[in-house]
């Protein structure tokens, strides 16, 4: 993707989100900011920066787009990929700089723009526009016989994790002594009123999940998740890297 293709990215943002670029700095006349109308937060910034500022050889100017990634684990995975760097001139814990020179496909750039738009949106807009998401959620067999939960029913009630919505996919990680992902489920209903609390567990709402697939308990073990996908703990609902998502769908 070249500077000419930067226009295609700008056109994509205009068409999908109705947002025009803003040029805020005389010193950097080509820096273009894109932001939400309702909360004025930036979700993208396109700019030409010296290659050396990204750790690349030479002093030629390269085109980048800065995007926010809320999921810190996913961000760490992203910056291992060619053409994606910690955010230049931005908070490096939450932003990435993506080359617009063809190193990263335009389709992927668009997907990351969509993620950044959602990450910076107001709570009301997030609820409206967020696409279905994939999660790993923990299940402790000490407190619930999850291995037999789907023996007599394809759909069960489960503790609703923060951020999970109807239409999302949850992969159930069963804790020790199993220590593996065993089930893929679709969330069919959320925000079911329920109150429960003891020394081990607090539940404020339930969701309904429908079984879609079972996995062999030796396939996605804790060791595999740790060594191949960089997942070192599953203590609550969490997003998953693209590589694991692809493997779970095979």
Image (spheres, rainbow, N blue to C red):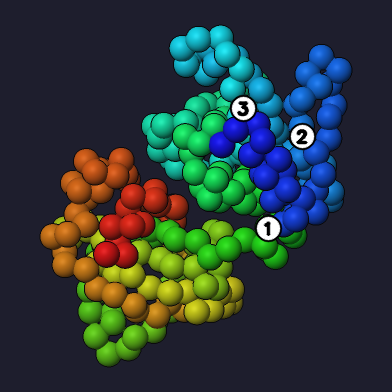
User: In this orientation, does residue 143 appear?
Assistant: no
What residue sits right under mark 3 in the picture?
63
Q: Residues within 10 Å of mark 1 (few under 14, many from 20)?
A: some
Q: Residues within 10 Å of mark 3 (few under 14, many from 20)?
A: many
Residue at 49% across / 43% down in the picture? Answer: 105
Between disc 2 and disc 1, whose residue precedes? 2
Whole-number angstrom distance, CA of label 1 to CA of label 3: 29 Å
Q: Secondary structure at mark 2?
A: strand
What residue sits right under mark 1 in the picture?
126
Q: Position of residue 28 (x, y in %)?
A: 78, 18
User: In this orientation, does residue 23 appear?
Assistant: yes
Between disc 1 and disc 3, whose residue precedes? 3
Task: Determine whether, in the image, residue 87 is placed left or right of residue 157.
Answer: right
Residue at 59% across / 22% down in the picture? Answer: 62
Q: Quadrant of residue 245?
A: bottom left
What residue sits right under mark 2 in the picture?
33
Tell which of 109 and 102 is nearer to you: 102
Task: Determine whether, in the image, residue 240 is placed left or right of residue 28.
Answer: left
Q: Residues within 10 Å of mark 2 (few under 14, many from 20)?
A: many
Q: Quadrant of the C terminus?
A: bottom left
Whole-number angstrom distance, CA of label 2 to CA of label 1: 20 Å
Task: Classify 173 as above or below 192.
Answer: above
């Amino acid at each position: 993707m070249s500077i000419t293709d930067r226009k295609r990215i700008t056109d994509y943002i205009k068409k999908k989100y109705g947002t025009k670029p803003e040029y805020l700095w005389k010193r950097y006349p080509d820096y273009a900011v894109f932001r939400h109308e309702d909360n004025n937060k930036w979700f993208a910034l396109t700019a030409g920066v010296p290659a050396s500022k990204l750790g690349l050889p030479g002093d030629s100017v390269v085109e980048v787009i800065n995007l926010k990634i809320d999921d810190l684990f996913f961000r760490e995975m992203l910056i291992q990929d060619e053409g994606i760097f910690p955010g230049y001139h931005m908070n490096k814990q939450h932003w990435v700089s993506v080359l617009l020179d063809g190193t990263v496909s335009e389709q992927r750039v668009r997907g990351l723009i969509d993620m950044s738009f959602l990450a910076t949106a107001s709570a009301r807009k997030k609820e409206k526009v967020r696409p279905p998401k994939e999660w790993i959620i923990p299940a402790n067999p000490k407190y619930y016989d999850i291995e037999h939960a789907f023996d007599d029913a394809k759909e069960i009630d489960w503790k609703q994790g923060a951020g999970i919505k109807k239409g999302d996919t949850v992969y159930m990680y069963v804790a020790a002594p199993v220590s593996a992902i065993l089930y893929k489920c679709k969330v069919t209903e959320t925000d079911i009123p329920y109150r429960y609390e003891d020394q081990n567990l607090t539940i404020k709402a339930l969701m309904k999940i429908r079984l879609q697939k079972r996995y062999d308990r030796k396939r996605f073990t804790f060791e595999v998740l740790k060594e191949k996908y960089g997942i070192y703990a599953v203590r609550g609902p969490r997003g998953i890297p693209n590589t694991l998502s692809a493997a779970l769908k095979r």
